[in-house]
Structure formats: C-alpha cells, structure tokens
Image (cartoon, helix red, strand yellow):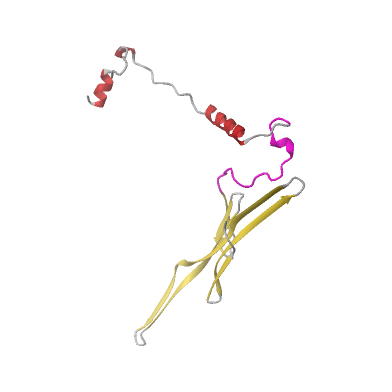
Amino acid sequence: MWGPSTVVRSGGLLSGARLGCRVKEEDVGRRETFSAEWLDLELSTRPEEGWCRREADERRRETLEQRGETRVLEQRSPWGVLRFGVLGQPLTQHLLPYARTLPLPLFAPPDLRGAKAGVPRTLSRSLSHEAQRDLSQLPPICPPPLDPREGPLKGGEIGETEARRIGG
C-alpha cells in the first residue's frame, strides 16, 4: 500500500509531507471485515512564480539569490473528491469522474444482495446483465445497401466500381 506517513524538514522548517489514511472495519456477528488504505494528504514546497531576488557585490565577490516558496496542499479521498490549493488559503474542491471503485456498501442488508430472495447474485450474473444492457444501447449493424445496377456478385469476384477504386 502507501507505507508509513512521512514528514520532511529542511533547515528546521516543514518542506513536505505525505500522510496516508487507513480504515479498518469488522463485523464480528456476520464475520465480515473491510480495510482500505490510501494517500490522503500531500504537502510539497515549490518555487513561487515570478519571485526571485539576486544581489551581486563585485568588490567582495559575493552573490545572493533568493527565491520565494509556495507550499502546495493536495488532498485526495476514495469518494472521488480532490482538494487542491496553497497552504493558508481556501482549497478548491474538484469531483473526479465516477468510477466503480470504493466506497463499497460494506454491510448491506441481505434483501439487497440478491435479485430474488434466497438466490445469491454472483459476479458472472451481474457482469452478463451489464453486458446485455450495454449491447442493447448500441445501434444495430446493417450492411450497406447494394446498387442493383452493378449486378449480382459471384463469390470471390470484385465488382467493377470496387476494382476501379482499388486501382486494379
């Protein structure tokens, strides 16, 4: 998974962090368990756009260069929410496209698990049902209409118009 959380310091100041989240649930009565782990929060330090100061002293042969820093905060969740922004300012929230991943219904009532009472719904049945639903939404495949002026084609023979189009 993501491993332990890490915090990076540079010169005594916080320069970066990666914080993970781990969730574990147990239902002893039904003998079910659920566990998930994901990278939740990431803090990184980046150079600030357009902020640079440079000084040069030719007599002493010294140069000083400073660049501004921005601490960028990024927070993810398994529910498809991404928060992004600069530390100390409000974060912008984005909803990621829906995908069939977490969160799963952890402890659903038994009457919702199967389509009929007493019949467990298997993965192959649910996949075949989804495939049938997807295929029913596709338009029917029809061959292109034949031109009656070309005459009937014999097996393995190319019509004149197709031969001209191919270049033969």
- Quadrant in which the C terminus appears: top left
Residue with the most extreme bottom position: 59
Is residue 80 shown above or below 130? below
| Above/below status of 70 relative to 131 | below
| Residue 110 located within the stretch drawn in magenta | yes
Picture residue at 72% right of the left edge, 51% below the top: 26
Q: Is 64 rendered above or below residue 42?
A: below
Nearest the eye: 27 or 60: 27
Q: Is residue 89 left or right of residue 110?
A: left
Q: Nearer the viewer, residue 140 or 38?
A: 38
Query: In this orientation, which residue lies closer to the viewer: 131 or 62?
Result: 131
Q: Position of residue 55 (x, y in %)?
A: 40, 79
Q: Give the farthest residue toward the left.
A: 168
Judge by depth and name the residue closer to the eye, 71 or 40.
40
Q: In the image, which residues are magenta?
A: 96-117
- Residue 140 at what x, y percent from top left? 48, 24
State the residue at coordinates (56%, 76%): 12
The residue lying furthest to the front in this view is: 31
Number of marks? 0
Magenta stretch encompasses residue 70:
no
From the viewer's perspective, tell me whether residue 107 is left or right of residue 165. right
Q: Position of residue 36 (x, y in %)?
A: 63, 53
Residue 11, position in %: x, y?
53, 77
- The answer to which quarter of the image holds residue 13 is bottom right
Q: Quadrant of the N terminus?
A: bottom right
Q: Quadrant of residue 166?
A: top left
Image height of 140 relative to 102, above or below: above
Magenta highlight: main SS: loop
